[in-house]
Image (cartoon, rainbow, N blue to C red):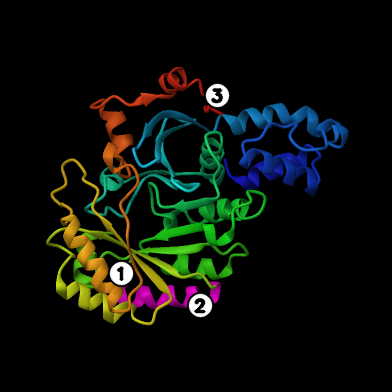
Amino acid sequence: MRIHEIKRRLREAGAGPSHEQRILRLWSHALPRNSGRRRPDSFFPSSLLAALPSIEAELAGLARIHAVHPGADGSERLLVALADGQMVESVLLPRDGLCVSSQVGCAVGCRFCMTGRDGLLRQLGSAEIVAQVALARLRRPVRKVVFMGMGEPAHNLDNVMEAIDLLGTVGNIGHKNLVFSTVGDPRAFERLHQQSVKPGLALSLHTTKAELRRSLLPRAPNMTPEELVAACERYARASGYPIQYQWTLLEGVNDSEEEMEGIVKLLSGKYGVLNMIPFNAVDGVAFSRPSRERCEQMARTLHQRGILTKLRYSAGQDVDGGCGQLRARSADMQVPLRRVDDWRQESGARSVTG
């Protein structure tokens, strides 16, 4: 289901703009229909009141939490079951953040990522993307949403941008706290400039060497690191938000002194921050992360040379929760996950199944 289809059904049922906004706001915030000072039956048309139970049931059925995987850092990795039985992952992050998925699988095939192993299975509808936010808000506040979960948002532009538009309006997420993450795509850069809700932008860079990047991200658009950074810089200046350049640290691959020189040359003077993320181990993948000492030394050296650099460890690494791993483990039945019913019995928490 897509958001514009929900709006059409609401209008056909007699909803005006204020009714439509209220219903979408309550849904995206995971609030009951009677929330707020005015009860719906006091100002909703009777035709809309009659249609609402069916529409609300369909929205609630878009997604449910299949399993919860808590991390010691305060994160929670959620395995989300969609109506057709497919699974995606969302991650509740410390400090009120949420990482959402935009596709089941991924077509880019990054060599260090589990998600792309099976290729792209299907797109998520914009309503399924927002449903992840609604589910997460049943558990804790969500004030930032990053599109860094399963899938390549640039390959599902219409649905992702529709979700961003809703989250940046009735969803009450600050525009700079909506982060569109991409491997880089000319269509995405063009579309971002056209958005009324302009999100922050994160670019999966990973290396300054064009040939190595083509090897690591085999089906990413054929843009050089210089072309990618130039496109990002134009958007950063237009939006007023610094670009987040993502760099997964792979031992012996992109952690060399030569790469650090390339970073200084490529990013000096640019409006952005370099996020260095030590590789999160994936079963069957030959890469490994550099030592903590090497990671810290790289970040410190780059910062001293004028590149704003942050060393970040992926949330939930202690539970092997990298993108695609929960879904793969559930499908393979290799490692049992904590189901929602088990979590509820232990904690006495309210239902989070939507």
- Marks 2 and 1 sit apart, C-alpha to C-alpha, by 24 Å
Residue type for callout 2: Arg
Q: Residue 286 placed where, x, y %?
A: 13, 49
Mark 2 near mark 1, Cβ–Cβ under 8 Å?
A: no
Q: Is residue 14 left or right of residue 303?
A: right
- Marks 2 and 3 sit apart, C-alpha to C-alpha, by 44 Å
Q: Residue 262 placed where, x, y %?
A: 23, 77
Helix, strand or loop status at disc 3: loop
Vertical placement of residue 16 versus 352, above or below:
below
Residue 237 is marked as 2
Vertical placement of residue 311 versus 287, above or below:
below
Is residue 214 found inside the magenta-colored segment of the image? no
Q: Nearer the viewer, residue 236 or 277?
A: 277
Vertical placement of residue 267 versus 25, above or below:
below
Please name which of the two marks, 1 or 3, marks the residue nearer to the observer: 3
- For marks 2 and 3, the one nearer the N-term is 2
Residue type for callout 3: Arg
Q: Quadrant of residue 62?
A: top right
In this rendering, does residue 163 appear at all? yes
Residue at image location 33% in from the left, 42% down from the top:
316
Q: Residues within 10 Å of mark 2 (few under 14, many from 20)?
A: few
Q: Nearer the viewer, residue 204 or 137?
A: 137
Residue 291 is marked as none
Q: To which residue does mark 1 refer?
A: 222
Q: Residue 242 placed where, x, y %?
A: 46, 70
- For marks 1 and 3, the one nearer the N-term is 1
Q: Quadrant of residue 261?
A: bottom left
Q: To which residue does mark 3 refer?
A: 350
Q: Magenta residues, as a range?
A: 223-239
Q: Residues within 10 Å of mark 1 (few under 14, many from 20)?
A: some
Mark 2 near mark 3, Cβ–Cβ under 8 Å?
A: no
